[in-house]
Amino acid sequence: MGYSLSFIDSTPPNQPHNRPAPSLLPTRSINTSAKSALLVESDESLSNFLTRRLKDEGYAIRSASNSEEGLRLYRECAPFNVVLIDYFVSPRTGVGIDCLAPQTKGVDLALAIRNIDPSQGIIVAAFAYRSAGEVPRPPEAMQIPLLIDSNIHQMRSLLERIEIDRAIKALTSPELLRLQKFAKFRVRGLGRAASGRDWEDLLADALHRTLIGTEDTQSGRHWNRKVGFVQHLAGVMSSIASLWKRQFKEKNTFLISELSVCDPEGQERSPFDDVPSRCKPADVGLIEQIEEDQILALLQDSPDATHVFRGLVDRLRKQEIISRYGLDEKRYAAAVRRIRIRLLADRNNTRGR
Amino acid sequence: MAFKKTDDDRETAMNQLADSVLGLSDEAIVGEIGEAGADADGEAERTRLVLRRMSQSWGLDGLWAESDQNLIPSQKASSLKR
């Protein structure tokens, strides 16, 4: 196998390596840190440079100077938030880099670690190349992110992407359900402004913008780690829903000059000249009325739920609704719960929304 | 009183319902999904898939290889059923 390391192949997974027992026990303490990184780098100056960068990003670091030591440390201390490996790392202590031989030890180590834990976040640093396309890699290593540029922005972006990926995997079922329901209500609130989009579009777009935010905080949404991931995605979904609404309104808004036409006598006429009132178009009014009727029909067996929904649509606050309809906290909460369940059940019976 | 409101009014109401979801306990959210006639585990997995697909499109595929096996039993929605 062209990309294997002999010491990797000879050591059974999860077994202590043959090297002398390391003097620095207990190694696992690093994983009590909020963020941990394993750095595998043979070049001392590069190691110092990358260590500084990782520390600046808040990582506690364990370092190895060759891939053999890196694998040993990984087996002893994994998992790490991220493993950063130099593409040109030497295979073991005392072995220099053979400039004539293909240099793949960094990638080999990355694949060996992937083999142990396919979900481990790994970055391979390949500063000698100008682009990812130039870096020789086997097909199975094509998805491992490459650090090409030594400036802090690319490293920060890759680290953030790995943290986002970890956050997604860590989401529990109730958290996923919260995100789904949140997205469903936001989309239902958009009505026609959703323009055929559903909750999946909204949630996917929120993550998309978050991933863009790892590279460009202007057009994307940076995830501030002080905020929980669910809360962050909910906030982004709210922003996107508002944006869709604005876009819908702008798309359906025209300048009078855009609509004006000239009659045969050369007189400029607006199509609104013949509109008798400020009433909304009949079809729009009808759609809104149908939606209202549907919601009220869903709630008809519960006067409390009907009252609370009316109060919410009237933009009343919780205490105002309670006061207006003579409810108490318990009845209010039960009514809101009933509304959520009924609306959700309604959508469960209609495809795609 | 006639109950006839605008899109904006209804949007406000739906947004409040959306916000109320974020404050629900784990047991409450799973319970409501079940009462609405949906399978909580299935819906959670469907949601994870939406996120996963987007993440994969950003070249993080390899990181997902064993995520399903990594799901610990305590995270399963069905274990929270009332």
Image (cartoon, coloured by chain):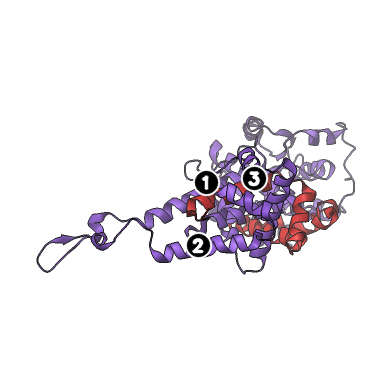
Q: CA distance from mark 3 to mark 2?
A: 23 Å
For the question of whether residue A123 can be seen, the reply is no
Q: Do marks 3 and 2 both belong to one polypeptide chain?
A: yes
Q: Earlier in the sequence, mark 3 or mark 2?
A: 2
The N terminus of chain A lies in quadrant:
bottom right
Residue A115 lies in quadrant: bottom right
Between A28 and A5, the one nearer to me in the picture = A28
Judging from the image, what is the letter of the chain drawn in purple?
A: A
Q: CA distance from mark 2 to mark 1?
A: 27 Å
Residue linked to disc 3: A325
Residue linked to disc 1: A239
Q: Earlier in the sequence, mark 2 or mark 1?
A: 1
Q: Callout 2: helix, strand or loop?
A: helix
Where does residue A237 sit, x and y in percent of width and height? Answer: 57, 49
Q: In the current view of this chain or complex, which residue is farthest to the front?
A: B1
Where does residue A306 sit, x and y in percent of width and height? Answer: 63, 54
Q: Which mark is residue A190?
A: none
Q: CA distance from mark 1 to mark 3?
A: 32 Å
Where does residue A340 sit, x and y in percent of width and height? Answer: 67, 54
Judging from the image, what is the letter of the chain drawn in red?
A: B
Label 3 neighbour load within 10 Å: few <14, some 14-19, many 20+: some
Q: In the current view of this chain or complex, which residue is farthest to the left?
A: A265
